[in-house]
Amino acid sequence: MNRQHFFQFIPRSRLVGYGILLVPVSFLGIFAMGEVLGGDVGGLTHIAQVTPLLLISLIALKRTHLAGVLLVVCSFLLGGVYFLWTGNMPMGTKILIEAILFVPSFLAGFFFIYISSS
């Protein structure tokens, strides 16, 4: 199947990539605000998790292909490490967290790579 034919329904893949990145950024941002406002200073660690996503988003403005590759590789590696690190967590919880935090970054990276090659 021709790549152009497959993606003809997506007019602006870069905007789709940024939209998909909003999922983990907003999820982690809500947790950070909730924990910090609740008095738990440990919630600031979520800001450290959001920062790389925001920096890669800024890179995508100028070097879309590089940002896409970074997102795909980092989300794949970090998702795998997280999956192995949470060994005793229930499988359903692992899958849900992977789907919210790592899969959107992978998909956004895919769209950034696609838009840079067309």
Image (cartoon, rainbow, N blue to C red):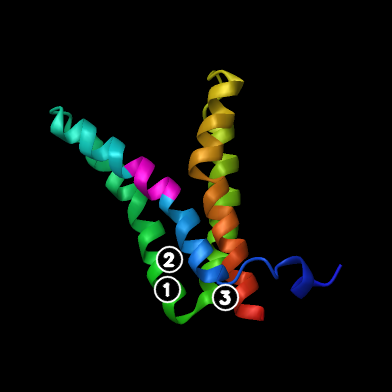
Image position, residue 6 (x, y; %)? 76, 66
Q: Above or below — where is 58 with respect to 37?
A: below
Regarding mark 1 in the picture, which secondary structure is present there?
Answer: helix
Which amino acid, by three-letter code, is at mark 3? His
Determine contact: label 1, label 2, CB under 8 Å: yes
Q: In the image, what residue occupies the spot 17% across and 35% down?
A: 36
Label 2 CA crowd tier, 10 Å (few <14, some 14–19, many 20+)? some
Residue denoted by label 3: 65
* Marker disc for residue 56: 2
**Mark found first going from the N terminus, 3 or 1:** 1
Quarter-of-image position of residue 39? top left
Determine contact: label 3, label 2, CB under 8 Å: no
Label 1 CA crowd tier, 10 Å (few <14, some 14–19, many 20+)? some
Residues rendered magenta in the picture: 23-28
**Mark found first going from the N terminus, 3 or 2:** 2
Q: How far apart are the two marked residues, 1 and 2, measured between alpha carbons?
A: 5 Å
